[in-house]
Image (spheres, grey):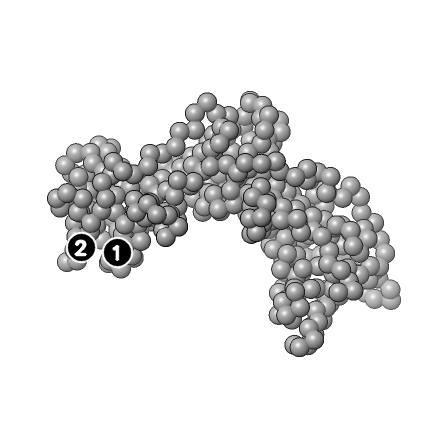
């Protein structure tokens, strides 16, 4: 095996796949390596896995020499070498046995690999359900719900993303019990899903990194235990999370008594400033809603207090439908919800101070109430 490839191209390919390597999480040394294989079409395929997650991508070589071949090399070492080498063409060739010589300009390395036959094959996802999603759509959906994935693995199903298929719509749902994130988009499928897969949070994060805003489609394939996503020469295969996702529909409030519409950028900036104090007191942020009363405009007031640090007060102009109220929220959660929606204006739909409230996007002057994008949040106790 011998191949020549642009350093930049190889480095980008390694960055795409090596996060799937097991690293020190496994007792199998082969899983610390990345698998490289070349073919007669001048393609170099890179693959990494920790047995639960597999990422592969194919990049174009500069030249192709000495027939098809494969090898495995230490992923971190290879990535560090590519980061350190100057721009130019890198040659990788067999140096006898499992050793390979890597050369670029006047620099050369002799790196010991492991037999490629020991490397785990790509899991088969056969007999599966299929759907097609525009890459930019799927990337956007993941970004809108990513913040709702639970970090605590006490309940494994909450550490994943529910992929719910209904007619021609794909709905992604996440919840950590403190907040619920929902986002949906159009898809192409003629198949009925009796059970909806739960994709591990780590897999959706890595999938988002693989996707680019383009006109291409992601081909998604699911069976009982696995899912595979393929797009533009790259693919990600992951085990599914077993279990039953919560009946999230019952958590979404069906009505509101107060609606606050506010510029998303202004709200995000105010939360960021108040969070300097709020994070010293469990991220507690109090929001007081005050309709116009002798003022030029409606307003909300954000306050954060810390016994040791001090206090912060932020005032924002807005539009309010309904009366006055005061509620308390986790500043970090609200900031992430506003950022994930990514519209110029957002709406907060409120009921009682201790009841769940909804953050919705406002597009073309209209609050989006169709459920295609929303975050439901649990408030914090005002008296704490």
Q: Give the mark nearest the N terminus, 1 or 2.
A: 1
Q: Which of 155 and 305 is in front in this view?
A: 155
Using residue 227 as the reference point, say whether residue 196 is left or right of it. Answer: right
Q: Which residue is drawn at 69% across and 64% down?
A: 284
Residue 199 locus on image (x, y percent): 52, 39
Q: Distance between the residues labelled 1 and 2?
A: 9 Å
Percent from the top left, x then y, of residue 135? 48, 38
Mark 2, residues whose alpha carbon is within 10 Å: few (<14), some, or many (≥20)? few
112 or 69, nearer to the observer: 112
* Direction from residue 292 to residue 303 in the image, left or right: left
Classify residue 292 by image quadrant: bottom right
Q: Which corner quadrant of the image does residue 93 belong to?
A: top left
Q: Which residue lies furthest to the front in this view?
A: 27
Q: Is any atom of residue 378 visible in this view? A: yes
271 shown above or below 18: below
Dividing the image into 4 quarters, which one contains the C terminus? bottom right
Q: Residue at x 46, y 22 (%)?
A: 127
Rendered position, 255 above or below 227? below
Tell me residue 325's x, y (percent).
Answer: 82, 59
Please, what secondary structure does the residue beneath circle 1 have? helix
Residue named by callout 1:
81
Q: What element carries label 2?
A: strand
**Which residue is denoted by mark 2 in the rendering?**
109
The N terminus lies in which quarter of the figure?
A: top left
Question: Does the residue at mark 1 contact the one at mark 2 (Cβ under 8 Å)?
Answer: yes
Q: From this viewpoint, is residue 168 visible?
A: no
Residue at (83% x, 66% y) in the render:
295
């Amino acid at each position: 095996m011998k191949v020549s490839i642009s350093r930049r191209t190889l480095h980008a390919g390694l960055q795409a796949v090596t996060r799937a390597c097991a690293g020190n999480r496994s007792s199998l040394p082969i899983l610390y390596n990345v698998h490289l294989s070349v073919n007669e079409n001048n393609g170099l395929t890179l693959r990494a896995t920790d047995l639960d997650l597999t990422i592969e991508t194919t990049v174009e070589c500069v030249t192709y020499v000495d027939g098809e071949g494969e090898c495995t090399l230490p992923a971190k070492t290879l990535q560090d070498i590519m980061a350190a080498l100057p721009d130019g063409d890198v040659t990788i060739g067999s140096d006898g046995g499992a050793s390979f010589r890597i050369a670029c300009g006047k620099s050369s390395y002799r790196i010991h690999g492991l037999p490629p036959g020991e490397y785990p094959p790509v899991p088969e996802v056969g007999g599966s359900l299929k759907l097609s999603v525009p890459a930019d759509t799927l990337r956007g959906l993941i970004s809108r719900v990513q913040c709702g994935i639970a970090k605590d693995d006490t309940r494994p199903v909450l550490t994943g993303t529910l992929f719910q298929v209904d007619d021609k719509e794909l709905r992604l749902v996440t919840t950590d019990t403190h907040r619920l994130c929902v986002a949906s988009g159009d898809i192409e499928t003629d198949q009925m899903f009796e059970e909806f897969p739960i994709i591990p949070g780590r897999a959706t994060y890595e999938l988002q990194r693989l996707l680019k805003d383009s006109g291409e489609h992601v081909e998604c394939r699911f069976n009982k235990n696995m899912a595979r996503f393929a797009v533009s020469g790259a693919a990600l295969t992951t085990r599914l999370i077993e279990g039953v996702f919560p009946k999230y529909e019952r958590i979404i409030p069906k009505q509101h008594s107060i609606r606050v519409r506010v510029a998303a950028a202004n709200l995000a900036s105010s939360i960021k400033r108040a969070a300097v104090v709020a994070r010293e007191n469990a991220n507690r942020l109090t929001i007081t809603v005050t309709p116009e009363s002798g003022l030029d405009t409606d307003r909300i007031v954000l306050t954060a207090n810390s016994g040791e640090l001090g206090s912060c007060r932020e005032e924002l102009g807005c539009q309010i439908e309904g009366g006055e109220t005061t509620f308390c929220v986790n500043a970090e959660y609200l900031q992430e919800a506003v950022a994930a929606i990514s519209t110029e204006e957002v709406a907060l739909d409120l009921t009682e101070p201790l009841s769940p409230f909804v953050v919705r996007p406002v597009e073309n002057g209209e609050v989006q109430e169709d459920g295609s994008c929303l975050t439901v949040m649990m408030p914090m106790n005002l008296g704490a």
